[in-house]
Amino acid sequence: MSQPWLKKQVNALELYTIDVIFGRRAGAGPVLYGAFLQSLSWVFNGVTQTRLWLYRHRILHDQPLGCLVVVVGNLTVGGTGKTPVVEMFARALRDRGRKVAILSRGYKSKSTPLWKKWWWSLTHAEEPAPRIVSDGVRVLLDSDQAGDEPYMLARNLPGVIVLVDKNRVKAGAFAIKKFGCDTLVLDDGFQYLPLKGRLNVLLVDKTNPFGNGQLLPRGILREPIKHLKRASYIMLTKSNGQRDPELEALIKQHHPTVDIIECAHRPQYLQRFGVALNAPEARVPLVFLQGRRVFAFSGIATPESFEKFLRDLGATLVGRERFLDHYRFEREDIEGLFELAMAERAECVVTTEKDAVRINESLAFPLPLYYLRLEIDILRGAEDFAGAVSRICFPQSGSK
């Protein structure tokens, strides 16, 4: 059985499952498959609730590391715009003089082969050290080895340590011992209970807060909505500036005292792919898109928001292609995309920053390729992002 055939079948099953979750398929087949997924959701819910109960009653113990631990996460899988929030937190903390390490599990990064893990366990007394994506000075791993988000964070955050390991207790201890870190930011760490955060920042996507309200795999929830109460702060992301009383009432129903900070992801500029980040021609102003024929592609959880950004900036989308979240592009994929773009007489091709890190930089393109750079803009709950960090991480210290 060839690997490309298997990959296509897995992708097709994932797409079919997503369609069933969001009610995009009709007929007996989707109904039966949905019922099967629902039965698995009940099992998943039981496991989730049992695990939380064990930690809450101290049967399983978290392991404090003696430093500030900030957890950034969500109740759902994918699509809350978490990476820009993690980046802004780490940057603001770094700029306030903290020695920051970001701890990530490296989702869909290249894992160590099983035989190597067995050999290590047989021949070594200790586990291998976490993978160092950035030592604060250099980026040491690519996106294939590190994962998309850790690599992107490492590239954008000089002075911040970025580590990848499924065991984030071990990674945190490593960051403290080797690099002298006094602040740990857990990327996507809301469900990681062995390392307790002093502050739990929970992100909720205003455009699709909790999906269909069902747990995995029938829905997109990792744990029940009522677990909003575990958050120290809630950040509503992807806001259009309009209040949502119904969503806010639901949040307050489960967590009456929680502070809510509302924010939006704002396009900042276009970055020319394959050009050094600090090169004069690297950054292109957003006005470049006005009236221009653009072909877009993405492999993210919510491609609709990315495509809307381009339209709102004045681009004429002559074509678009969507891939599964974290899809790793092959040469044939990229060549096919540019063929489609040229057939539609596109003037350029635009993708997301997260997708750009999964494209081979040695490839030559017949059209210019750009990615859209996004950053966080605070709309309500703090005067700006630095104020939000000060309020969340230094509540008693003012502007120290």
Image (cartoon, grey):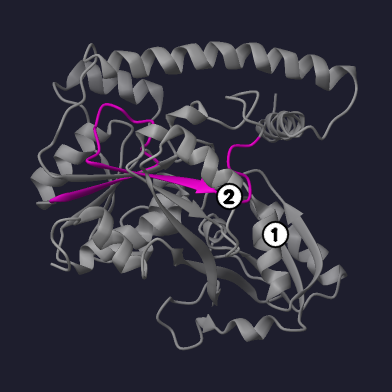
Q: Which of the 4 quarters of the picture holds residue 25?
A: top right
Badge 2: few (under 14), some or many (20 or more) residues near its Cα, within 10 Å? Answer: few
Q: Specify the amino acid type for callout 2.
A: Pro
Residue that mark 2 sits on: 245
Q: Does residue 104 appear to the left or right of 240 in the view shown?
A: left
**Residue 298 position in % (x across, y down):** 65, 56
Residue 191 or residue 157, whichever sits in front: 191
Identity of the residue drawn at 36% across and 70% down:
383
Q: Does residue 73 appear to the left or right of 9 in the view shown?
A: left
**Residue 315 position in % (x across, y down):** 74, 76
**Overall secondary structure of the magenta section:** loop
Q: Is residue 108 visible?
A: no
Residue 120 or residue 220, whichever sits in front: 220
Residue 21 or residue 226, whichever sits in front: 226
What span is in magenta? 182-211
Residue that mark 1 sits on: 297
Badge 1: few (under 14), some or many (20 or more) residues near its Cα, within 10 Å? Answer: many
Which image quadrant: the C terminus? bottom left
Q: Which of the 4 quarters of the picture holds residue 243?
A: bottom right
**Residue 111 position in % (x across, y down):** 41, 34
Identity of the residue drawn at 72% across and 64% down:
296
Reply above or below: 386 against 299.
Answer: below
Magenta run includes residue 188: yes
